[in-house]
Amino acid sequence: MPRLTTETIGAGDQSWLGSSHGIHECRTEVLDISTFTAATHFPNGFIPSGTPVAKVGGVLVPYDSTEATVNGAGVLAGHLFTDQPVVGTNDFGVPVLDHGRVKVAKVPQGANAFTAPVAAAKRAATTIVYI
């Protein structure tokens, strides 16, 4: 008997989007799953749509919203466009929204509330308008 599994794939809760601008131009990047923790970033088995990410060493890592951190993980690369199921420990490609409008109050950020970056250096890699 074959080992069959059922998986439901969807976009997730995209209420964090402030407009449809940019959704057809999401870029594909590789997510370094080893930098995300199950309890904080994917307690339900997936990293939620809207999660802010930074690009360090050519791969995506969790974004550090501490305003004084303006390099590495402190530079916003964008937001994951769709829910990303986590299966195993291999890195994988994800769609990233790096321009458009985003509702700050709806951005998932683990245990902490998301704060829109103020410093120009923190948002230099994006053209996102936070509302």
Image (spheres, grey):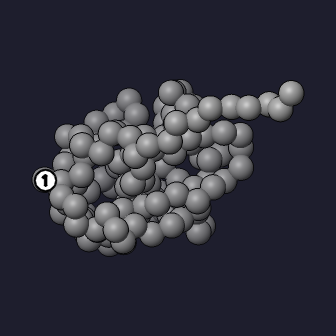
Above or below, comparing residue 100 to residue 42 in the picture: below
- In the rendered structure, the answer to whether residue 116 lies left or right of residue 65 reads left
Residue at the extreme front: 1
Question: What is the crowding at mark 1: few (fewer than 14 residues within 10 Å), some, or many (at least 20)?
Answer: few
Q: Which residue is depicted at the point 50% across and 27% down?
A: 44
**x%, y% of residue 46?**
52, 37
- In the rendered structure, the answer to whether residue 14 lies left or right of residue 7 reads left
For the image, the number of numbered tags is 1
Q: Which residue is depicted at the point 60% across and 40% down?
A: 86
Q: Secondary structure at mark 1?
A: loop
Q: Which residue is depicted at the point 28% across and 68% down?
A: 22
Q: Amino acid at mark 1?
A: Ile
Residue at the extreme left: 131
Above or below, comparing residue 7 to residue 60 in the picture: above
Above or below, comparing residue 98 to residue 107 in the picture: below
Residue 21 visible in the picture: yes
In which quarter of the view is residue 75 placed? bottom left
Q: Which residue is mark 1?
A: 131
State the residue in front, 39 or 71: 39
**x%, y% of residue 90?**
71, 49
**x%, y% of residue 43?**
51, 27
Q: Which residue is depicted at the point 62% across and 32% down?
A: 6
Report the quarter where the N terminus lies: top right
Above or below, comparing residue 85 to residue 123 in the picture: above
In which quarter of the view is residue 56 placed? bottom right
**x%, y% of residue 7?**
58, 35
Residue 69 visible in the picture: no
